[in-house]
Image (tube, grey):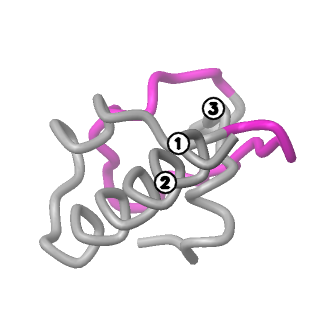
Amino acid sequence: SIHSDIGDSMTGAKVNGKLVSLDTTLKNGDIVQITTSDNAKPNRKWLTFAKTSMAKRAIRHKLGKLRESNREN
């Protein structure tokens, strides 16, 4: 579980110092580092590996806001 401000702008992750995909399963004791970018945006693919309904709801909400802002431009 991570804060939505970090999740909305994440670009990748390292587990125990090694670059991994965002859908990597973690084990007890793993040390996780999330990389972020101001230009990053949530991706619909994230919904396939989000585990909690709260995470999925947050991703859908952000995707909806991005769609709305694209329509306005």
Total marks in image: 3
Residue under numbered circle 2:
68
At label 3, counting other C-alpha atoms closer than 10 Å, the crowd grade (few under 14, some 14-19, many 20 or more) is some
- Indicate left or right for 15 with 63 as reference: right
At label 1, counting other C-alpha atoms closer than 10 Å, the crowd grade (few under 14, some 14-19, many 20 or more) is few
For mark 2, give the secondary structure: helix
- Indicate left or right for 47 with 20 as reference: left
| Quarter of the image that includes the N terminus | bottom left
Q: Nearer the viewer, residue 4 or 18?
A: 4
Residue under numbered circle 1:
71
Label located before the other in sequence (1 or 3) = 3
For mark 1, give the secondary structure: helix
User: Could you tell me how far apart the alpha carbons at marks 3 and 2 are, in whole angstroms?
Assistant: 25 Å
**Which kind of residue does numbered mark 3 sit on?**
Gly
In this rendering, the answer to whether 35 lies above or below 22 is: below
**Residue 16 on the magenta segment:** no
Q: Which residues are magenta?
A: 18-40
Residue under numbered circle 3:
12
Residue at 69 percent across and 50 percent down: it is: 9
Of the numbered discs in the image, which one, if any, rests on residue 48?
none
At label 2, counting other C-alpha atoms closer than 10 Å, the crowd grade (few under 14, some 14-19, many 20 or more) is few
Asked whether the residues under the numbered discs 3 and 2 touch, taking CB atoms below 8 Å apart as contact, a structural biologist would say no
Q: Nearer the viewer, residue 34 or 42?
A: 42
Residue at 61 percent across and 41 percent down: it is: 41
In the image as oriented, which residue stretches furthest toward the right? 38
| Quarter of the image that includes the C terminus | top right
Label located before the other in sequence (3 or 2) = 3
**Which kind of residue does numbered mark 2 sit on?**
Glu
Residue at 31 percent across and 34 percent down: it is: 44
